[in-house]
Image (spheres, helix red, strand yellow):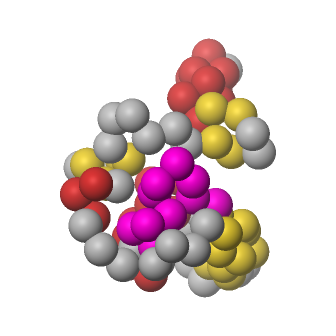
Amino acid sequence: MAAPLSVEVEFGGGAELLFDGVKKHQVTLPGQEEPWDIRNLLVWIKKNLLKERPELFIQGDSVRPGILVLINDADWELLHAVNAEE
């Protein structure tokens, strides 16, 4: 079982308005059977942090087009492309 994981989630560019106007959230993700990935994180964010209008943040099982997701200041789509080549 994966141990709990502490992460900082930050919203900007107007997205913070969907989260009660709070830009930075220090959260501890609970331990679970499988390792945490972005898909699981988005579900957790929707259930636990998102306060209004989920359709402006989530579309299907990802973020809406036009929302830039950075992981340690790198675009998550670039990180995914690198992992897909391995």
The span shown in magenta is 10-19
Nearest the camera: 67 or 71?
67
Q: Is residue 86 above or below residue 41?
A: above
Q: Is residue 52 left or right of residue 27?
A: left
Q: Is residue 42 above or below residue 80?
A: below
**Residue lying at 72% horizontally and 67% vertically, measured from the top left:** 8
Q: Is residue 19 visible?
A: yes
Where residue 17 appears, as percent x and y from the top left, is 43, 66
Q: Is 60 a magenta residue?
A: no
Where residue 75 appears, as percent x and y from the top left, is 63, 32
**Residue 46 figure quarter:** bottom left
Where residue 18 appears, as percent x and y from the top left, is 39, 68
Quarter the N terminus occupies: bottom right
Q: Is residue 63 left or right of residue 2?
A: left
**Residue lying at 52% horizontally and 38% vertically, measured from the top left:** 68
Q: Is residue 83 above or below residue 32?
A: above
Q: Is 12 a magenta residue?
A: yes
Quarter the C terminus occupies: top right
Where residue 12 appears, as percent x and y from the top left, is 57, 54
Q: Is residue 63 left or right of residue 60?
A: right
In this rendering, the count of numbered labels is 0
Q: Is residue 80 visible?
A: no
**Residue lying at 34% horizontally and 35% vertically, measured from the top left:** 65
**Residue lying at 46% horizontally and 78% vertically, measured from the top left:** 20
Q: Is residue 35 above or below residue 56?
A: below
Q: Is residue 7 left or right of residue 18?
A: right
